Amino acid sequence: MSKPVYPNLFRPLKIDGLRLKNRIVMVPLYLGYAAVGGTISPLMLSHYKLMAQSGVALIVVENASITPSGSGSARTIRCDHDRYLKGLNRLAQTIKEEKAFASLQINHAGRFAHVAEPVSASAVPAFGRTPRPLSRGEIKTVRKQFAKAASRVQKAGFDAVELHGGTGYLLAQFLSPWTNRRNDGYGGPVENRIRFPVEVLKEVKDLVGDFPVAYRFLADEWLPGGLGVEESKVLAKALQENGVAYISVMGGTYESFFAPEVIKNSRKPGYMVYLAEAIKKEVRVPVITAGRISTPGLAESILKEKQADLVGLARMLWVDPDWPRKAREGHDRSIVKCSPKCDACLQLVMQGKPAFCPRWKKEKRAEYKALFR
C-alpha cells in the first residue's frame, strides 16, 4: 500500500511577508509552564524548542499579559514592562533556531483576570465576581497597553504578534452582546461593539509599522444571548480592512466550555472547522482553523475543501510533537492521539500545576517535572 500524500498540507503560504513552509500552525495552548510572576522558565524554553522542532511553520506562544490587572494567572507570561524583554527574546530565538516562525499572543483577560477588581465592558458577573465597567479614559489606556506590549513583542525578536480576541477575554467582552451592555459609542449595535477591538488593532499597527499583527477570533460564544457567527462576520471584515495579517478562528468561552452539549461536540474531530469556513467566506486574509484536528487526512481535507488556509494544532502537537513528520512520511497510524475523553492536563492546570500528558513516557514526564520552577 502506498503512503498517503498530503500536497495541500505541505504547500507553502505567504502571510504578510512571512513565507510559511507548510500549512501547520501551533495555536496557543496554556499549560502553566511560565514561572510564577510571568517570566520565561527553563521548562517553557524546553517545551517550545520541542514544539518548533516538530516541523510546524509557525508557533504562536500563548497569552502574554499587557498589564498586571489583566493577567489570567500567576503563571501567565508577562509583556507589560521592558524587564521581560530578555526572557521573551530567549523564547523567540529558541523557536526561530529550529526554523519555525515565532509569534506571541498578547491579552487582557478582562472579567476573567486573576485580580481583586476585574474590569470589562459592562458589570456582567462571571463565576461569582462582578467586573467594573471600563471608563472611556480607561479604554484609551488599554489600547495604549496593547500597542506598547506589541512593540515589546517586536523588539524581542518575534516574527509577529497576535491579539487575543478569543475565549471570552476583554476584546471579545466588548464584541459580545452578552457581556457588553453599554449605552455609549462602544455598546448597542454590533457596529459599535466592534469599535474597541478595531481601535486596538489600529493603535497597534500605528506603533509597530509593517510588523504582522494577527487576531485570535471568537466566532461564536455558544451561549444563549451571546455572540453568534453573523455578528462576528462584521468584525472579521473590519479587521481585514484595517490590515490584520490572519484570523485564527475559535468558538466558546469559559462560560460555555463546560456545558454538556459543548463538551459532547468538542470530542468530535474538527469540531470548530465550520466556524472558520463561515469566516473564510467573508475575508481574503488567511484563516486558521483548529479544534481536535487529530489526523493528517482531516487536515488535508480541510485545506482541499477550502474551509481554511491553515490548520492549527494545540494538544495534538503537545501529545505527539512528531505529528508533522509522521504526516509528511505517511506514518499516520503511528501518531499518538489526544484522547477526547481525557482531561488530565486541564485538571492539572486548574489546580495551578504544570500540565503533563498521561500518554507520555515516564522519562519525559520526569524531565518536565525536573525543569518546573
Image (tube, grey):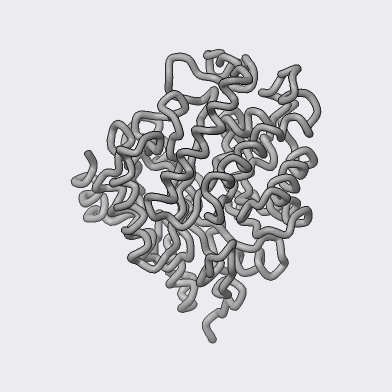
Q: Nearer the viewer, residue 195 or 338?
A: 195
Q: x and y percent of residue 89 in the render?
A: 33, 51
Give the camera-side residue of 248 and 325.
Answer: 248
Residue at position x 36%, y 48% in the image: 357
Q: Is residue 142 visible?
A: yes
Q: Where does the image place residue 230, in percent across and percent down from the top left?
A: 80, 41
Circle count: 0
330 with respect to 82 (left or right): right
Where is residue 84 drawn, in percent x and y? 32, 40
Question: Residue 339, relative to residue 300: is it above or below?
Answer: above
Which residue is the extreme one toward the bottom?
2
Q: Residue at x 47, y 38 (%)?
A: 148
The residue shown at (31%, 58%) is 94
- The image quadrant of residue 173 is top right
Position of residue 353 measured from the top left corner of the image (x, y, whole percent): 32, 35
Q: Residue at x 41, y 27 (%)?
A: 68
Q: Is residue 329 above or below residue 248?
A: below
- In the visual, does 256 lie left or right of 325? right
Q: Residue furthest left?
A: 370
In the rendered image, the quadrant that contains the C terminus is top left
Residue 258 seen anywhere in this rendered image of the structure: no
User: Which residue is more in the foreground, 344 or 139?
Assistant: 139
Q: Quadrant of residue 13?
A: bottom right
